[in-house]
Amino acid sequence: MDPIDPSGEVPRAAYRFIAGYDTAIPTRAVDKCAAHFVPLALADLDPVRTQADFCRAFGERSDLRYQRFQFSNYLQHNVVRAMILLRAGRREEGRLALDEFCRTFELDPGDKVLAAYVQLADGFAAQHGAAAEGRPQAGDRG
């Protein structure tokens, strides 16, 4: 999530080093930027502990209205959302999301890489059916 988007405000101190023409590495400015944004990112992702949490978080993000860039402006968001839904056993939602991704980027939904992933995700979901119920799975934090 881009912490700037919900408000549309760009913290001056956080991005000062981007606006200049100085080619030296602005270590202090980068440190200040990281000090501002890393805690926001960690707090934002802290509630995500299971595949169900991940699915919920992606769903919430896709519904937010941002000031600069929408969820769908980032190529990886929609394909990752589709893949995690498939892996979590939410096949219909995952297929719809994958089909939408393919339509948007004019990709063949039958592409061998995508088809192989869908097959792997289906197998994983069948083996780990609890994921769709929100119970922690192997590899989940928590």
Image (spheres, grey):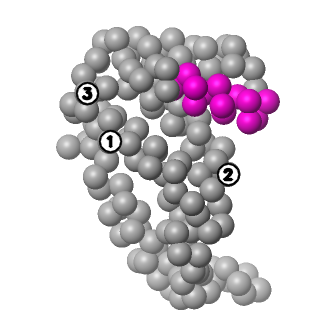
Label for residue 19? none
> Label 2 belongs to which residue?
73
- Residue 95 or residue 45, whichever sits in front: 95
**Magenta residues, dominant SS class:** helix
- Rendered image quadrant of residue 17: bottom right
Rendered residue at 25%/32% (across/down): 134
Q: Is residue 102 magenta?
A: yes
- Under mark 1, the amino acid is Asp
Upstream in sequence: badge 2 or badge 1: 1
Q: Position of residue 99 (x, y in %)?
A: 65, 25
Looking at the image, residue 117 lies above or below residue 78: above
Secondary structure at numbered mark 3: helix
Count the labels in the image: 3
Instruction: State which region is magenta.
Output: 94-106
Rendered residue at 38%/16% (across/down): 124
The quarter in which the C terminus is drawn is top left
- Rendered image quadrant of residue 76: top right
Q: Position of residue 21 (x, y in %)?
A: 77, 86
Upstream in sequence: badge 3 or badge 2: 2
Secondary structure at numbered mark 1: helix
- Relative placement, left or right, of 62 versus 49 is right
Rendered residue at 66%/31% (across/down): 100
Residue 90 visible within the image: yes
- Relative placement, left or right, of 95 versus 125 is right
Rendered residue at 50%/78% (across/down): 33
Is the Cβ of the residue at disc 3 closer than 8 Å to that at disc 1? no
> Label 1 belongs to which residue?
53
Secondary structure at numbered mark 2: helix
Upstream in sequence: badge 3 or badge 1: 1
> Label 3 belongs to which residue?
133
